[in-house]
Image: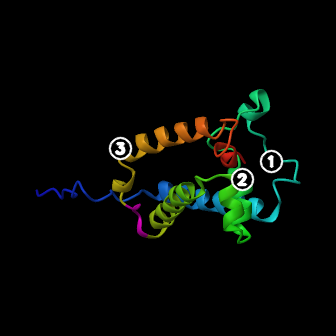
Amino acid sequence: MESVQQNSNEPRISSGIERVFAGAAIVVGVAAVSVVAYFNPVTAEFFPQCPLNQMTGLHCPGCGLTRGFHALFHGDILGALHFNLLIPAYLFIFGYLGLTLVSIVFRGRGLSTKAFNPKFIYGFLIFSLVFGVIRNFPFYPFTILAP
């Protein structure tokens, strides 16, 4: 009997339950995007505050992302970049994740994970850490990185 081997470079076919979970993740993601787009995080009080900022007054690498995405969803690109300069990187990551989930639902396989190899992940983490440190320097030009 001949066994069929899948090419190791291709993602495996997702099971039915994985497709259901991917669909549920899409629904949750669309709901989250809708809430951020509709409600202004500056005035709405139900958005969580950054714990690091609340306890220390320091800005983490993610501070300003919710406000930045709200501005981006309303077409204010410069405002979004003012809140967090890493918005384009997060937009790429979240967009790629969203496309992968849609691909799992409709094709049964996600997009290639070659874009997120360990070098990229470690590089992004180190860059984020450095960004988080320099955005807290209390002198110009680093003060413009604070949200």
Give 103 or 6, whichever is nearer the viewer. 103
Q: Confirm whether the magenta stretch covers residue 108.
A: yes
Q: Kindly identify the residue that appears in the image at 75 percent across and 59 percent down.
A: 36
Q: Alpha carbon of mark 3 to alpha carbon of mark 1: how far?
A: 33 Å
Prevalent SS, magenta region? loop
Type of amino acid at the residue the image marks with label 3 = Lys
Q: Which residue is mark 1?
A: 47
Q: Is residue 77 visible?
A: yes
Say which label, 2 or 3, has the lower sequence index: 2
Type of amino acid at the residue the image marks with label 1 = Phe
Say left or right for 26 vs 42: left
Q: Which residue is mark 3?
A: 119
Residue 121: x, y in percent?
Answer: 42, 44
Give 112 or 58, whichever is nearer the viewer. 58
Cβ atoms at labels 1 and 2 below 8 Å apart: yes
What segment is highlighted magenta in the picture? 107-111
Secondary structure beneath dot 2 equals: helix
Q: Which mark is residue 66?
A: 2
Secondary structure beneath dot 3 equals: helix
Secondary structure beneath dot 1 equals: loop
